[in-house]
Amino acid sequence: VTEPDLAGRHVVVSAGGTREPLDPVRFLGNRSSGKQGYALARTAAARGARVTLVSANAGLPDPAGVDVVRVGTAVQLREAVLKAAADADAVVMAAAVADFRPAAYAAGKIKKKDGQEPDPIVLVRNPDILAEISADRTRPGQVIVGFAAETDDVLANGRTKLARKGCDLLVVNEVGERKTFGAEENEAVVLGADGSETPVPHGPKEALADTVWDLVVRRLD
Ligand code: C5P
């Protein structure tokens, strides 16, 4: 039996991966499936929370009893997260947000020109949503959680990222060819701004989600 320990709380979860368009048919994207974010949304709803799920290109069915806001790009994801975060008790940024987007969008499909090399793709920085919401907490006591995928020096890089972003918890997982992205299972360490370190053994994405909510609930009380 699940404890309704998030009853009366509003939580916001971002999920999926942003797509940054180059022209009407092409985009720069990433391999995030959205499964971890959807597991976070489902488990929070099961624990009694009102849940807003900001979903970027996940292609997964809407979880029952969750408000789903669909977005495409990082800029749209930022708008939706900031709006939903205004009255949220917790925000979990599980989405893979593109760090950069193409500087220009071509209104017509980009064509190859005979005998010519292609134009380079110029990128500009996207806003860092996690750093922004962590810096401007919209309510006292709001708990903010980030995710980080690292390929090496997982704990050291995680600690540096946690400090740089200013969030309360950072879920760090090691990624590789067949690890994490699109998989049904995950393995992670949850780092706390208070110095805590909670290892989560290899298991279903729901189990990691429940551990994240346990740590959030402890900080909300
Ligand atoms: O810096 P990095 O992309 O590794 O950080 C990952 C964390 O930051 C994730 O929680 C992701 O949702 C968030 N993020 C963000 N805005 C960005 C890039 C990442 O909120 N532009």
Image (cartoon, rainbow, N blue to C red):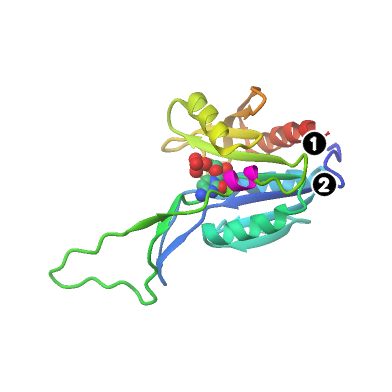
Q: Kindly identify which residue carries mark 2.
A: 9
Residue type, mark 2 in image = Arg
Give the residue number, with chain letter if any, for mark 1.
220
> How packed is label 2: few (under 14 Cα within 10 Å), some, or many (20 or more)?
some
Question: From where the camera sits, is residue 176 visible?
Answer: yes
Quarter of the image for residue 46 reads top right
Picture coordinates of residue 220 (x, y %)? 80, 36
User: Residue at coordinates 62% horizontally, 29% vertically from top-left?
Assistant: 190
Q: Where is residue 61 drawn, in percent x and y?
A: 65, 58
Residue 52 occupies quadrant = bottom right
Q: Quadrant of the C terminus?
A: top right
Q: CA distance from mark 1 to mark 2?
A: 10 Å
Q: Where are the magenta residues, as a range?
A: 130-135
Q: Are marks 1 and 2 in contact (CB under 8 Å)?
A: yes
Q: Main secondary structure of the magenta part?
A: helix
Amino acid bearing label 1: Leu
Residue farthest toward the left in the current orientation of the protein: 115
Say if residue 59 shows up in the picture: no
**Label 2 residue SS:** loop
* Secondary-structure class at tag 1: helix
